[in-house]
Amino acid sequence: MIRGWPAVVVIGAVLAACGTPTPSISASAEPSVAASSMPSATASPKAFDLPEAGRPFDAEAILAAMRDSRRPGGVPDEMQTDAIAAAVADAIWTIDGEPW
């Protein structure tokens, strides 16, 4: 049993020597992005022109889509109610507020 330990130590040392060294960060390292190109703390919180998310459908549009559905068998009559159409319309959001 004692003869196996030196072999384990040697194998461990070999494996440790084969590993890649951990890179170190020196104090003189230059940042990869110029500080002037980064937004400042006083910049507007909306730095990019992103579309405004929104609900593109109202209950009437959803109810009309349910009635005109090409789904085999259509949408069941029990589902075609104002309350369900309103709930579906409130649940649908698009990233730009436009219908898909």
Image: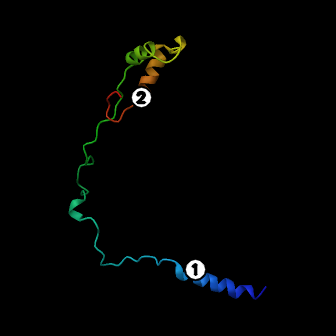
Residue indicated by mark 2: 92
Residue at 45 percent across and 23 percent down: it is: 88
Quadrant into which the N terminus falls: bottom right
Residue at 68 percent across and 85 percent down: it is: 7
Do residues under tags 2 and 1 come within 8 Å of each other at their CB atoms? no
Q: Quadrant of residue 60?
A: top left
Query: Label 2, label 1: how many angstroms apart (C-alpha)?
Result: 55 Å
Q: Position of residue 12 (x, y in %)?
A: 62, 81
Residue at 65 percent across and 85 percent down: it is: 9
Return the residue nearer the eye: 18 or 57: 18
Q: Secondary structure at mark 1?
A: helix
Q: Position of 95 compared to 75: left or right?
A: left
Residue 23 versus residue 90 in the image, above or below: below
Lower position in the chain sequence, tag 2 or tag 1: 1
Residue 33 versus residue 27 in the image, above or below: above
Residue indicated by mark 1: 15
* Category of crowding for the residue at label 1, using alpha-carbon neighbours closer than 10 angstroms: few (below 14), some (14–19), many (at least 20): few
Q: Residue furthest left?
A: 36
Q: Residue furthest top?
A: 77
Q: Position of residue 82 (x, y in %)?
A: 45, 14
Q: Position of 53 compared to 63: left or right?
A: left
Amino acid marked by disc 2: Ile
Q: Position of 53 compared to 73: left or right?
A: left
Quadrant into which the C terminus falls: top left
